[in-house]
């Protein structure tokens, strides 16, 4: 018998892979989050990211903007999974606690703090995979649940803008 936990785990794995494959060359594809685990109710999810040389800042550590993006991706993934609708980030606060070194894996654990009809609020922690006892960053973020109708309108605008760009070339 398949447990609810296994269903959530499989659903999150599929979502990560689907996003990566649907958008070749995008942030989702280039940063390529990897599923690590989720809680029984899937209100908590852990992903990891390989820290590549092109992600470094001028002094050789992981760029803070990349750290922020990875944490946003981890939390946004969980918001989308629960709402099954687009959930753009409306606010995010990140606290950098220590640098992340290139070459390893950054692990991001995200948790839903509030799952409302219009807003999802999450928290996240990050650490180097081989140094779990030492957090490197924490974050909180809110995501707006935009609804299917608004999402369809946005898709139409995106297609229209893309068509205009192609015609201009």
Image (cartoon, rainbow, N blue to C red):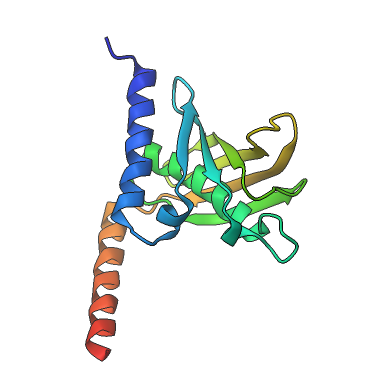
Looking at this rendering, what residue extends furthest in the bottom direction?
168
Against 23, residue 109 (above or below) is: above
Indicate the position of residue 121 as horizontal and vertical percent values: 55, 42
Q: Where's the N terminus, which quadrant?
A: top left
| Residue drawn at x 47%, y 27% as measured from the top left | 38
As rendered, which of 93 and 100 lies closer to the eye? 100
Location of residue 18 with respect to 24 vertically, above or below: above
Q: Is residue 157 visible?
A: yes
Is 8 or 88 nearer to us in this picture?
8
Q: Position of residue 9 (x, y in %)?
A: 38, 27
Left or right, residue 127 beside residue 5: right
Horizontal arrangement in the rendering, residue 83 relative to residue 143 (left or right)? left
Q: Residue at x 41, y 49 (%)?
A: 145
Q: Give the side of residue 106 with respect to residue 134, left or right.
A: left
> Quadrant location of residue 55?
bottom right
**Residue 162 x, y percent position in the rendering:** 27, 76
**Residue 84 seen in the figure:** no
Q: Residue at x 67, y 38 (%)?
A: 127
Q: How many marks?
A: 0
Q: Position of residue 97 (x, y in %)?
A: 77, 46
């Amino acid at each position: 018998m398949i447990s609810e936990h296994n269903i959530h785990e499989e659903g999150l794995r599929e979502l990560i892979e689907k996003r990566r494959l649907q958008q070749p060359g995008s942030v989702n594809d280039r940063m390529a989050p990897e599923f690590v685990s989720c809680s029984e109710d899937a209100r908590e999810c852990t992903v990891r990211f390989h820290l590549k040389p092109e992600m470094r800042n001028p002094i050789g550590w992981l760029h803070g903007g990349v750290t922020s993006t990875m944490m946003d991706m981890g939390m946004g993934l969980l918001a989308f999974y629960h709402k099954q609708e687009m959930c753009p980030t409306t606010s995010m606060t990140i606290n950098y606690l220590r640098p992340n070194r290139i070459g390893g894996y950054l692990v991001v654990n995200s948790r839903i703090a509030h799952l409302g009809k219009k807003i999802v609020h999450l928290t996240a922690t990050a650490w180097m995979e081989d140094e779990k006892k030492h957090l490197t960053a924490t974050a909180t973020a809110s995501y707006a649940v935009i609804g299917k109708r608004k999402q369809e309108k946005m898709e139409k605008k995106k297609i229209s803008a893309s068509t205009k760009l192609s015609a201009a070339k």
